[in-house]
Amino acid sequence: MNVPARLGWYKFLNFTNTMIIYNKIITLKWGVGMSLVGYNFGKILKSSRIFKGLTEAQLAAGICSEEDIIQFEQEEKYPTIDQLYKMASRLEVELNHFFDIASTDTYNYAIAVTELIKKYKRERDYAAINEIIQKEQDNPLFKHTSFNQFLIWHEGICTYYLEEDKQKSITLLEQALAMTHKEQALMTEREIEILTSMAIIEKDSGDLDTAVNLFRNALNQLTELPQVQDSSIWLRILYGLAQALSKQEKYEESLIYCSKGIDNCIYEENMYLFGELYYQTGMNFIKLGKENKGKEYLEKAIMIFKLQQNDKFASLVSTEMEKLLKYC
């Protein structure tokens, strides 16, 4: 299979890091005078804590002080072996988690790969995502829970859109979710994103009742988080829920979630799904017999897509608007 030209940067990144990924995985044995200096420990500890949805105080409870955690993450000082072991247990990671991905080179490589996959997901380029997953799934760095979960999650997404195998797709997404989520526990931001992916696939496959229930669950879980790192999650849920409700011909209710999404885009100064939300709003108004108002929103959607240099979507909306208004 030929690697698409758009993957050129990824191929370069992969090539220049081959020796790093396979030869610089660090394995440490505790001994006299063993130090954490130089292993990017603070960044790994903080990212692991945030991934589990814990505050500094929650991680510190019964182990050390909250101030200690802050100093550990800033690498102003380092924990004892006993403290490190207890923190690893609370974070539900192996002790060597702090070392195997703590090399600056290997850690940054993994982050770069995940960010590239996110970029292709926004562009709906599932073939490119799948190409990366196939190359990285045997990489030792991606055997760690956080990165492994990320790959399985996106493998599930690709399975549906490339193979049209919904059952296998949902199974992979459930597997990814089960890697970290405990029954009855509140979900982390990552887990809510996986749940949202399941809802989107149910929507796209036509199981609208299941999709709506999953979207509502994801929305409820998200409101329980003390802080949301990526505001785009709100938009994916609100837009997906609005789409599903429109397909159920619940146009008035769909408009409520479209409005919430548009307000979120404006508040967060985020253009992600901005045009799509205007498009969905316009379609809802047209279905409700409010053609002039619907046309107004569709024209704004076209303008937004053009500003984003998304000529394909701008053309699709324009064509759809002409067809709809022709028979109104």
Image (cartoon, rainbow, N blue to C red):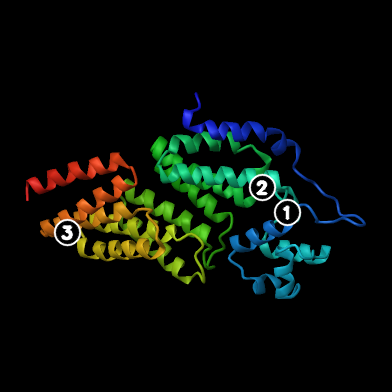
Quarter of the figure with residue 280: bottom left
Mark 3 lies on residue: 285
Q: Relative to the observer, which residue lies in front, 232 or 214? A: 232
Q: Residue tagged by mark 2? A: 107
For label 1, the residue is: 40
Q: Is residue 190 left or right of residue 317?
A: right
Which residue is at 13% across, 47% downward?
A: 324
Mark 2–mark 3 CB contact (< 8 Å): no
State the SS at label 2: helix
Mark 1 residue element: loop
The residue positioned farthest toward the left in the image shown: 327
**135 shown above or below 258:** above
Residue 306 image position (x, y, % from top left): 29, 45
Quadrant of residue 137 in the image? top right
Q: Is residue 61 in view from this perspective? A: no
Q: Residue furthest front?
A: 307
**Which amino acid does the dot numbered 3 rest on?**
Phe
Callout 2 amino acid: Tyr
